[in-house]
Image (cartoon, grey):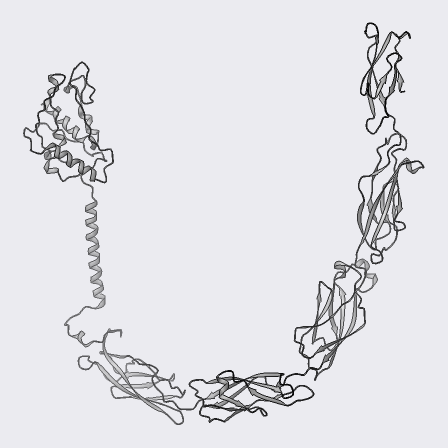
Amino acid sequence: YILQLHSNSDKGDGSVKYILTGEGAGTIFIIDDTTGDIHSTKSLDREQKTHYVLHAQAIDRRTNKPLEPESEFIIKVQDINDNAPKFTDGPYIVTVPEMSEMGTSVLQVTATDADDPTYGNSARVVYSILQGQPYFSVDPKTGVIRTALHNMDREAREHYSVVIQAKDMAGQVGGLSGSTTVNITLTDVNDNPPRFPQKHYQLYVPESAQVGSAVGKIKANDADTGSNADMKYTIINGDGSGVFSISTDKETREGILSLRKPLNYEKKKSYTLNIEGANTHLDFRFSHLGPFKDVTMLKVIVGDVDEPPLFTMPSYVMEVYENAKIGTTVGAVTAQDPDTANSLVRYFIDQNTEEDKYFTIDASTGIIKTAKIFDREESPWYNITVSASEIDNPELVSHVPVGVRILDVNDNPPEFDREYDTVVCENAKPGQVETPIMQPNRSGKQQHSSYLHLHQIFLQKDNTASIMTRRRRYSRTTQDIYYLPVLISDGGVPPLSSSSTLTIRVCACERDGRVRTCHAEAFLSSAGLSTGALIAILLCVVILLAIVVLFITLRRSKKEPLIISEEDVRENVVTYDDEGGGEEDTEAFDITALRNPSAAEELKYRRDVRPEVKPVHRHHLSSSLDSIDVQEFIKQRLAEADLDPTVPPYDSLQTYAYEGHRSEAGSISSLDSATTHSDQDYNYLGDWGPEFKKLAELYGEIESERTT
């Protein structure tokens, strides 16, 4: 039951009928039409609809007429605590740095209650923590979660699960509640220094370890993670700081110990290293926790390894004369066993190359001797490799390069390095220098030259000789070739010499000394032209030919006149018998303009350019006709037009039909009209261009004759 409607007109006899309309009428709300009582048919939910607007009216049951005006009333739904608080998000995942101060804000959670906040405490929510104490706390009004302890250490515990409850009715008994879970993770900070597990380490390294190779690893532990655990290893002191180096592996955070210098067990059997591991990223808030580095001592034990023999020198250079006999001692090499056992050494030469076969070596003493005869001119150097191994352990072998220089012996006489083509000018003067002569000596000794009468030879410091003339002028006609014997000797011990013949040709030369010709027959001609003169003549001839060709080309490309002279035109009188309109039609059409006179038969007209001068009208008609056939003339004109490449394609033969004058049908010809010939003015035909030139001349002449 909700309420009752009552009208003042209702006397209780049932004559008044109550009607209810509006929101929910008939479905949610029903009315007793006799008593006016209103009831709800189902429970109402304020969270879905807070109020309903209804209209009520009282009418006469018999006449259905309204007894009172329609009334409006509102039914408000009163709230009750039927909705528990709900968290909008969840579960929550948050992080907070470790070692944070107590009361550091972590997260704020919010719960909503669908009940009416203005009515009672149904929507008044209070927050509390159900799980997560004593590490965290929550503000009961705002829902802000805070840390509840000082210096929470991630290394001790990293993850926390906190349960937060929201309860309405201000947390009183009977209130509805809801909860959510907050997962809190402590993030790492650099609050832990690196620590070596041991204060002393020992490492064994064989003396055969290669320089640059990794010989060991060492690692310091750091409880932090990520960049907070990054560290760098260094060797701070110790007698092995110059022999070893250390680097950091960024992935494993290990210190990699490498060898910088070779080890020798016989010289030093152990090394001591002080290695430091320090963090690279420091947080000054936690500097009070101590130095973020640690130091440990590493002792490196050098292991003895059986090594191959060691030569006293890294390389050897020896000398021997090229004429040395087989078995001559060249030199000796020495190798020793570096180990403490000091085993005996055996020497040998691997006969792998041709150069190795020129030498032998004593296996016990290392003395090298010759095995073949040398020739310095073929090979001045020999490079061999000598090997040494222990007798007890032949697998341990060492090698050393040996270079043998072959000393020269004067065993080759000097000679010309090539054939020389030497010339002398006819107009040569005494003392003039001719082509120098190269005089190499295969033995490398200084040389001297002798000479013959007509020329003089001077020896230069660079082992060359210059030929100088001793007289003035030479004649090709008298003698065109001279043979000059030359004696070449060196300064070796013993001195060697050789003789050669130098051929010298007599040639005609220019004033500047350039050779013109060396043939004697060139002097038979009494007069001759130089090369420059011949070139000038040829250039003149070529220029004249070019001018002639250009002139002919211009003459051929010159355009022909468009109009022929009037004197070259001849006329023939031809009689035509026309049948048609009347006597006036018997006047024959003058076709003389269609014929090309023989005098102008070879002329070629341009029909694509308007003539520059108007044609001159003739004042008389020729009474004589030539014997040129009209049909043949037209064929020639057509053939000429077809072969002319400059004529546009609009040239064609037009036929005009004359139907007579003043006939019943009239004339449609453009050549005639209702007027007589004398009424027409044909002067405008002179402006028609080359296409109608003949017609212009024809009618112009007829008009002139009639006027006369």
Quadrant of the rendered image containing residue 11: top right
- Residue furthest to the left in view is 624
Say which of 362 and 155 sits in front. Answer: 362
In the image, residue 79 lies at what x, y percent?
87, 28
Identify whether 539 is placed above or below 424: above
Identify whether 618 is placed above or below 601: above
Q: Is residue 142 visible?
A: yes
Say which of 127 and 484 sits in front. Answer: 127
In the image, residue 100 lies at what x, y percent?
83, 53
Question: The N terminus appears in which quarter of the rendering?
Answer: top right
324 on left or right of 654? right
Quadrant of the rendered image containing residue 685: top left
In the image, residue 413 lies at what x, y percent?
36, 89
620 on left or right of 443? left
- Residue furthest to the top in view is 63
- Residue furthest to the right in view is 173
125 on left or right of 584? right
Question: The C terminus appears in which quarter of the rendering?
Answer: top left
Residue positioned 65% across, 88% down in the render:
392
Total residue callouts: 0
In the image, residue 523 lies at what x, y percent?
17, 75
Quadrant of the rendered image containing residue 436: bottom left
217 on left or right of 463? right
Q: Is residue 707 visible?
A: no
